[in-house]
């Protein structure tokens, strides 16, 4: 793996972070992103950008990180024993947007590149990432648009690409302890290194660049919908599921914490306000019940 290839990926990721921040800041119109550059003692660093208390977004975080190390955490080596004894580099952009209006869904996107090297041996590398949507009050047209963008960006990479990564997303963003999906899915891919570096990198770029095309039209469609205390309390309750997934099941969160990553940046995905309620039950035939009955099921939207 050449340094030139690594630098190409890093340059794209930094550019992607900047472009997404500009677009989200423009859409919000009420607050700027604050930038926080940081260094990691074990190697590498990153730039965290957070928009807080905006007119549209209660909190939006867009994080770039490029971390290096002489050895992976024991949990990662146990999962991938071929990585043991190799130095590694991991770089990526990860973002989560938590809107204020309950009718505007939360969104998440991530694109990343990993390489593990050892003198005298071929490098082990792959790309990963995806994006997914978590509504509190669902709309069929939003789900169709979200998945149509995902399908269309996958089309140049083969007819089986969208069905494969859509299904992987449904499987990955699933709260096993609740027996329910986190949201309406999208795309998820990992361990991508075939048919080669350029093609894999091209797909990662397509996913990263497709996020705004998928999300911003939904934001504009829902941002002016009127809402009240009922919708707000349901939003805060459902945000609890987001926290549960990230802390219990998300591999990226686990890898970041176990590899000595910057905790403040790793946990920027958490919503600023959230609540839990013991034994919550939705009213029958309510908009809140429709979320779980109609939207939080694995289905083909396109």
Image: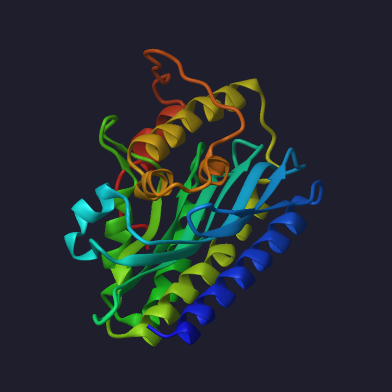
Residue at image position (58%, 55%) is 63
Front residue (pair 124, 95): 124
Picture coordinates of residue 85, whole percent (x, y): 25, 63
In the rendered image, the quadrant that contains the N terminus is bottom left
Can residue 121 be seen from the camera position used here? yes
155 with respect to 239 (left or right)? left
Front residue (pair 18, 113): 113
Residue at image position (24%, 80%) is 121
Residue at image position (58%, 76%) is 11
Can residue 171 be seen from the camera position used here? no
Q: How many marks?
A: 0
Q: Which of the colour schemes (rainbow, by chain, secondary structure, one colour) is used?
A: rainbow
Please, is residue 130 above or below residue 161 in the view? above
Q: Quadrant of residue 105?
A: top right
In the rendered image, the quadrant that contains the C terminus is bottom left
Front residue (pair 23, 37): 37
Please, is residue 276 above or below residue 208 in the view? above
198 with respect to 172 (left or right)? right
Picture coordinates of residue 294, whole percent (x, y): 36, 40
Please, is residue 8 above or below residue 223 in the view? below
Picture coordinates of residue 243, whole percent (x, y): 45, 33
Please, is residue 36 above or below residue 152 in the view? above
Residue at image position (26%, 30%) is 177
Q: Quadrant of residue 19?
A: bottom right
**Which residue is situated farthest in the right direction here?**
30
**Which residue is situated farthest in the top direction here?**
278
Picture coordinates of residue 150, whole percent (x, y): 43, 67
């Amino acid at each position: 793996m050449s340094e030139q290839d690594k630098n190409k990926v890093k340059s794209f990721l930094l550019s992607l972070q900047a472009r997404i921040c500009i677009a989200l800041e423009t859409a919000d119109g009420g607050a700027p992103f604050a930038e926080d550059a940081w260094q990691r003692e074990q190697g590498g660093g990153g730039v965290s950008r957070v928009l807080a208390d905006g007119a549209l977004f209660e909190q939006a975080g867009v994080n770039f990180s490029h971390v290096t190390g002489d050895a992976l955490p024991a949990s990662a080596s146990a999962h991938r024993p071929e990585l043991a004894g190799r130095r590694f580099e991991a770089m990526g952009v990860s973002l989560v947007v938590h809107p204020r209006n309950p009718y505007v869904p939360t969104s998440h996107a991530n694109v990343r590149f990993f390489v593990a090297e050892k003198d005298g041996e071929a490098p082990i590398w792959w790309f990963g990432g995806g994006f997914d949507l978590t509504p509190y009050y669902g709309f069929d047209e939003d789900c169709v648009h979200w998945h149509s963008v995902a399908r269309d960006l996958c089309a140049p990479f083969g007819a089986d690409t969208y069905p494969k990564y859509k299904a992987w997303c449904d499987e990955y963003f699933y709260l096993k302890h609740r027996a329910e999906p986190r949201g309406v899915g999208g795309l998820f891919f990992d361990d991508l290194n075939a048919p080669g570096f350029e093609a894999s990198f091209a797909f990662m770029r397509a996913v990263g660049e497709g996020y705004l095309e998928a999300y911003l039209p939904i934001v504009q469609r829902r941002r002016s919908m009127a809402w009240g205390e009922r919708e707000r309390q349901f939003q805060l309750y459902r945000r609890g599921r987001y926290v549960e997934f990230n802390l219990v099941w998300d591999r990226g969160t686990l890898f970041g914490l176990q590899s000595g990553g910057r905790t403040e940046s790793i946990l920027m995905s958490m919503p600023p306000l959230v609540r839990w309620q013991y034994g919550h039950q939705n009213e029958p035939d309510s908009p809140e019940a429709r979320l779980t009955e109609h939207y939080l099921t694995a289905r083909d939207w396109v």
